[in-house]
Amino acid sequence: VQLQASGGGLVQAGGSLRLSCAASARTFRMGWFRQAPEKEREFVATITWNGGSTYYADSVKGRFSISRDNAKNTVYLQMNSLKPEDTAVYYCAAATENRGGTRTYEYGYWGQGTQVTVSS
């Protein structure tokens, strides 16, 4: 499975961005993770292809929204009310099994990452 993430950029605090992740095939679950400089990669959000079940990290709950377009095999991450601490490289990931969805090892496929920078 190949993943292509896009949509990152520079935005002021309080602004919005929408990330996209196009997959070459449909998998059981898609997720978004992020990694800030000198920090470990952390879970952001996940969604299942079948029922659209979603789950978010506490740090983004209420501000970010994950969705999918099954016809396009594409997952989106709408990010609102962005904060400087949201600055990171954002990665999309795909999992072929139902193994929870919040840990990096549960995903077998990763996109190349897209930079999100939020200025204060």
Image (cartoon, rainbow, N blue to C red):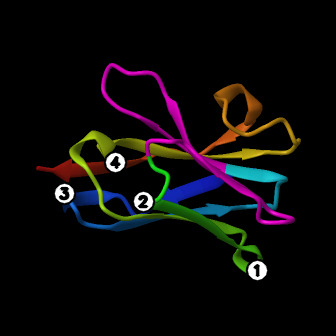
CB atoms at circles 1 and 4 under 8 Å apart?
no
- Determine crowd level at label 2: few under 14, some 14-19, many 20+ residues with C-alpha closer than 10 A: some
Pointer 4: what residue? Answer: 115
Image quadrant assignment for residue 21: bottom right
Toward which corner of the image does residue 17 lie, by quadrant?
Answer: bottom left
Indicate the amino acid at tag 4: Gln
> Any magenta on residue 39?
yes
Mark 3 = which residue?
13
**Inter-mark Cα distance, 2 to 4:** 18 Å
Query: Which quadrant of the structure image shows residue 63?
Result: bottom left
Q: Amino acid at mark 3?
A: Ala
Element type at marker 1? helix
Q: Is the residue under label 2 in contact with that under label 1 (CB below 8 Å)?
A: no
Q: 100 or 9, which is in the foreground?
A: 100
* Residue linked to disc 1: 71
Q: How many marks?
A: 4
Of callouts 1 and 4, which one flags the residue occurring earlier in the amino acid sequence?
1
**Crowd class of label 4 (few under 14; some 14 to 19; many from 20; radius 10 Å):** some
Considering only vertical position in the picture, is 56 above or below 5?
Answer: above
What type is the residue that disc 2 sits on?
Arg
What is the distance, in whole Å, between disc 1 and disc 4 at their CAs?
Answer: 26 Å
Q: Residue furthest left?
A: 120
- The residue segment tinted magenta is 31-59
